[in-house]
Image (cartoon, helix red, strand yellow):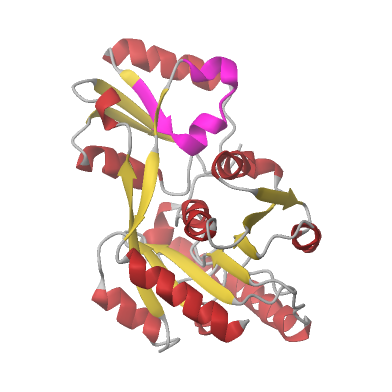
């Protein structure tokens, strides 16, 4: 079982837990910077787009990787590279449902396999912090709601590395509404950043309209899923949050079923959570399928191709 994200990570000010943990964060940052100064990046014969994040979890890397795959699938021969983690089977399953995927414990090995199989464009789902691979284009995803949280590095805050690492980034993709103030904050670290926005559009809302619903989710930011349901005027009577990449047990299912009876409501969850549930148990739950819509997609694609041409 994994721990839930600490609430103090998303405060706009430093709290006592952040201050107490700050020395550990400083040590983490020093080690990362020293390691970064010694590691040499390896170039590959095919262009690599990295879809990464700095804020830990819940920023939309996997949906954006799928979106980019679909953008290029008719013009090139793309493949998504996903490092294999035991606790991220859901993301691998979701990718395989919509894309060509190569997944191994070593990104190097996956990239070499992709090149051997004659794929022409490699899309890294995660990997911005992998210092061994030279990327032709770096995309960093944020959520407008969480942004950079309290701005501190793990474990004092939610950042995987210092925000100054955006100097190696080309495009910022923000899930949510346009936020000029946030853009200006990030531009302090890289004036050349290009900003685009995306949102999730539910595809099967009609299945759940006019019904009482209990929503549960074990993703990076479950509250974003709950807010999306309410924004689309679904009648959510109870919300239940689990840790990111949570492994559901039979005991969890029993508790959820008891709540379903108590509230006389339908249980619904995210597609990622649904894929973490055994096929036998899935029949108990509803799932919301989402489509990723990028605002000004024409210029987004144009910018992708321009940067790839410049850095190839």
- Which residue corresponds to the image point at 41% horizontal and 58% vertical from the top-left? 8
In the image, residue 13 above or below residue 165: above
Magenta span includes 282:
yes
The quadrant of the picture occupied by the C terminus is bottom right
Task: Locate residue 127, reporting x and y percent.
Answer: 63, 64
307 left or right, relative to 105: left
Is residue 212 something one can see in this rendering?
Answer: yes
Task: Locate residue 286, reporting x and y percent.
Answer: 39, 23
Task: Locate residue 254, reporting x and y percent.
Answer: 49, 14
Count of picture labels: 0
- Which residue corresponds to the image point at 21% horizontal and 39% vertical from the top-left? 232
Examine the image and state in which quarter residue 247 appears. Answer: top right
Question: Which residue is more in the foreground, 91 or 14?
Answer: 91
51 left or right, relative to 221: right
Magenta span includes 177:
no
Is residue 150 something one can see in this rendering?
Answer: no
Examine the image and state in which quarter residue 49 appears. Answer: bottom right
Task: Locate residue 246, reporting x and y percent.
Answer: 56, 36
Question: Which residue is more in the foreground, 266 or 118?
Answer: 118
126 left or right, relative to 220: right
Q: Which residues are magenta?
A: 267-283
Question: Which residue is more in the foreground, 255 or 199?
Answer: 199
The quadrant of the picture occupied by the N terminus is top right
- Which residue corresponds to the image point at 33% horizontal and 37% vertical from the top-left? 203
In the image, residue 132 above or below residue 66: below
In the image, residue 127 above or below residue 182: above
């Amino acid at each position: 079982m994994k721990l839930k994200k600490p609430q103090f990570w998303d405060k706009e000010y430093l709290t006592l837990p952040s201050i107490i943990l700050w020395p550990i964060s400083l040590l983490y940052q020093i080690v990362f910077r020293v390691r970064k100064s010694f590691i040499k990046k390896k170039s590959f014969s095919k262009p690599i787009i990295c879809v990464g994040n700095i804020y830990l979890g819940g920023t939309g890397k996997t949906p954006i990787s799928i979106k980019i795959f679909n953008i290029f699938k008719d013009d090139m021969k793309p493949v998504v590279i996903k490092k294999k983690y035991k606790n991220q089977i859901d993301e691998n399953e979701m990718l395989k449902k919509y894309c060509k995927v190569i997944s191994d414990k070593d990104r190097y090995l996956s990239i070499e396999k992709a090149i051997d199989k004659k794929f022409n464009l490699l899309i890294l789902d995660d990997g911005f912090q992998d210092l061994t691979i030279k990327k032709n284009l770096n995309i960093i995803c944020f959520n407008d709601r969480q942004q950079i949280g309290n701005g501190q590095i793990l474990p004092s805050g939610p950042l995987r590395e210092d925000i100054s690492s955006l100097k190696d980034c080309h495009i910022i993709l923000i899930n949510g509404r346009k936020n000029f103030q946030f853009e200006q904050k990030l531009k302090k670290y890289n004036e050349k950043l290009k900003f685009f926005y995306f949102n999730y559009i539910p595809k099967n809302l009609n299945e759940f309209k006019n019904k009482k619903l209990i929503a549960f989710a074990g993703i990076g930011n479950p509250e974003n899923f709950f807010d999306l349901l309410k924004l689309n005027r679904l009648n959510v009577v109870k919300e239940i949050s689990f840790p990111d990449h949570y492994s559901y047990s039979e005991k969890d299912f029993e508790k959820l079923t008891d709540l379903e009876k108590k509230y006389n409501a339908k249980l619904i969850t995210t597609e990622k959570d649904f894929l973490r549930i055994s096929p036998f148990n899935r029949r108990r739950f509803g799932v919301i399928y989402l489509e990723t819509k990028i605002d000004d997609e024409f210029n987004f694609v144009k910018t992708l191709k321009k940067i790839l041409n410049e850095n190839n």
